[in-house]
Image (spheres, rainbow, N blue to C red):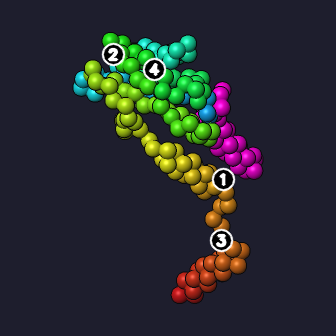
Amino acid sequence: MFVGKKYISLLCVALMSLTWFGAARAEHEANHRYTMRGYVLDANKQPLAGQQVLVAVGQVSGTATTDEDGYYSIKLHLHDTDLGKQLQISAGKNEASLRVAFKVGDEHTERRHYVNFVGDQLVEEQLDRGGLPIWGYAALVLLALGGGWAVFGRRHRRPAAATQSTQSSRKKKRHKRKRR
């Protein structure tokens, strides 16, 4: 039964890793994937949940709805030839016209464009909304592995010799008390 728990914990960690790392994959090659992401916030920087976000680049378009944090993410299938094309984005009453920008020839890095609407202002940079950084997830995995090892791993037991010597010293103390 003890061995089964150990394997179950390892299986859970493996499945969690697959879901975390599997989510990063997309249906397109990295050099065709263009991800628009950001937040839709009011003038007081409070999230606007349920906002429809629309993005269009020529004939390619995508939509998303903001979550409870005001966050959205849209993946578009763009090629190197789309560099510099006009990009239209709208979220609620906000609209903007931008240019598609990325590093041509980079076939390994996902092409990301951060577009945030804060009130009626457009902010083209990644906003820090107090979420857990990437290294924080790695630390959580390490803690989970360490905790699993401590719970299901080797138990702290005294060596047989130490146990016997402790028992014999207890017997001697009892024997001395009886003699008095």
- In the image, residue 176 sits, relative to residue 153, either above or below, namely below
Q: Which residue is more in the foreground, 137 or 84? A: 84
Amino acid type at mark 1: Phe
Q: Alpha carbon of mark 2 to alpha carbon of mark 4: how far?
A: 17 Å
Q: Alpha carbon of mark 1 to alpha carbon of mark 4: how far?
A: 57 Å
Q: Alpha carbon of mark 1 to alpha carbon of mark 3: how far?
A: 17 Å
Q: Alpha carbon of mark 3 to alpha carbon of mark 2: how far?
A: 68 Å
User: Residue 18, located in which quarter of the rendered image?
Assistant: top right
Amino acid type at mark 2: Asn
Q: Is residue 28 magenta?
A: yes
Q: Label 1 neighbourhood size at 10 Å, few (<14), some (14-19), many (20+)?
A: some
> Residue at label 3?
158
Helix, strand, or loop for circle 2? Answer: strand
Residue 93 % position (x, y): 32, 12
Q: Alpha carbon of mark 1 to alpha carbon of mark 2: how far?
A: 54 Å
Q: In this view, does 121 lie to the left or right of 169?
A: left
> Residue at label 2?
94
- In the image, residue 34 sits, relative to residue 131, either above or below, namely above
**Going 73% across and 47% down the picture, which residue do you hit?**
7
Q: Earlier in the sequence, mark 2 or mark 4?
A: 4
Span colored in magenta: 1-29
Q: Which of marks 3 and 2 is nearer the N terminus?
A: 2
Q: Which of marks 2 and 4 is in front?
A: 4
